[in-house]
Image (cartoon, helix red, strand yellow):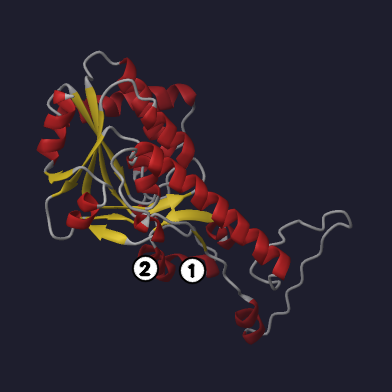
Amino acid sequence: MNAETFSGLWYIDKPFVSRMEGIILPRLAAGFDPIPSHFKPAMAITPYDKNGEYSRARSYLRDYLKTGGGDVAVIPVSGTMSREGYCGMGNEFIIDLLAEAAQEKEAKAVVLKGNTPGGTVDSIEIFADAIKKFPKPIVGYVNGSVASAGVFAFSQTDHIIIENSMSAAYGSIGVLMVHIDQSQALEKAGLNVRIFRADESVDKAAINGIEPLTPELMAEIKADLNDAMTLFKGYVKRGRAGKLNTEEVFSAKMYNKTDAIKYGLVDRAGSLADAIKEARKM
């Protein structure tokens, strides 16, 4: 893993990016794993095969059913979202949990309990589609703050309840890309770094932190960002059809509970118990 890993497209809240830069960039510069080990839950860093993943999903589902009173699975969506999980469980693992819940007779419904700044564009579509196609009632509960990729996913639930607190927030419907220009730092350090490519490999690692971005590359990046944003908007509009009442929410602003309800991003305020009750009623 290197700096380029963090230069792709992200559905993530910008203030979170700023906070994490102070942790990730110094570790990258020192040649360390960018995410400190104590930030990672054990299951996100333990290798397992397909069969092992399946048994783990069933094991976790049993615990999540206990949280919901035995018939509603309360599945957490926390930390930075990605396919395998930087600081959380990983989108693919939660998809496996939903597949288990769909077949488990004791699981009558699911509550997704979210507290996330968002994450990578990669895998968020399949996660959102898994929620949309889930055959049983599924409720989203905003446990503090759900931003960006979290909204992409949560918008596909049947009903969304936001925590009834002053600090609760929901939104940041937007997409960004972080590009780190290391050229001046390298020059200051007395390092003259050059990239050599095979004659036919003219586009190999064209976007990097050493060579300047050409106008063509910047236009390409902007086009990719706009395409990702169009996709994001489409999913939110599909999931909140008949409830969303303004285009203002697509400016990437975060909203408090009052405004999130007013604009139709969420349905109402309440507690986790209310979310479980709603899922059970549905």
Q: Residues within 10 Å of mark 1 (few under 14, many from 20)?
A: some
Q: Earlier in the sequence, mark 2 or mark 1?
A: 2
Q: Quadrant of residue 73?
A: top left
Task: Identify which residue, 17 or 140, lies in the foreground.
Answer: 140
Quarter of the figure with the C terminus: top left
Locate residue 47 relative to residue 114 in the image: left or right: right
Residue at position x 36%, y 63% in the image: 16
Looking at numbered disc 1 in the image, what kind of residue is underneath it? Answer: Leu
**Which residue is depicted at the point 56% across and 62% down?**
3
Between 38 and 210, the one nearer to me in the picture: 210
Whether residue 56 is visible here, answered yes or no, is no
Q: Give the label on residue 96, or none.
A: none
Residue 25: assigned label: 1
Residue in front for this viewpoint, 44 or 202? 202
Residue 83 vertical position relative to residue 282 in the rendered view, above or below: below
Q: Which mark is residue 19?
A: 2
Q: Residues within 10 Å of mark 2 (few under 14, many from 20)?
A: few
Q: Position of residue 186 (x, y in %)?
A: 64, 79
Per the image, label 1 sits on a secondary structure element best described as helix
Q: Quick check: 42 left or right of 225?
A: left
The image shows residue 126 at horizontal and vertical percentages of 47, 34
Question: Quarter holding the N terminus?
Answer: bottom right
Mark 2 and mark 1 in contact? Answer it, CB < 8 Å.
no
Q: Position of residue 48 (x, y in %)?
A: 46, 31
Residue furthest to the top in view is 105
How far from the left and from the top, in percent, is residue 224? 60, 54
Number of the front mark, 2 or 1: 2
The residue drawn where x is 69% and y is 64% is 217
> 77 or 62: which is nearer to us?
77
Secondary structure type for disc 2: helix
Q: Quadrant of residue 191?
A: bottom right
Amino acid type of the residue tagged 2 in the rendering: Arg
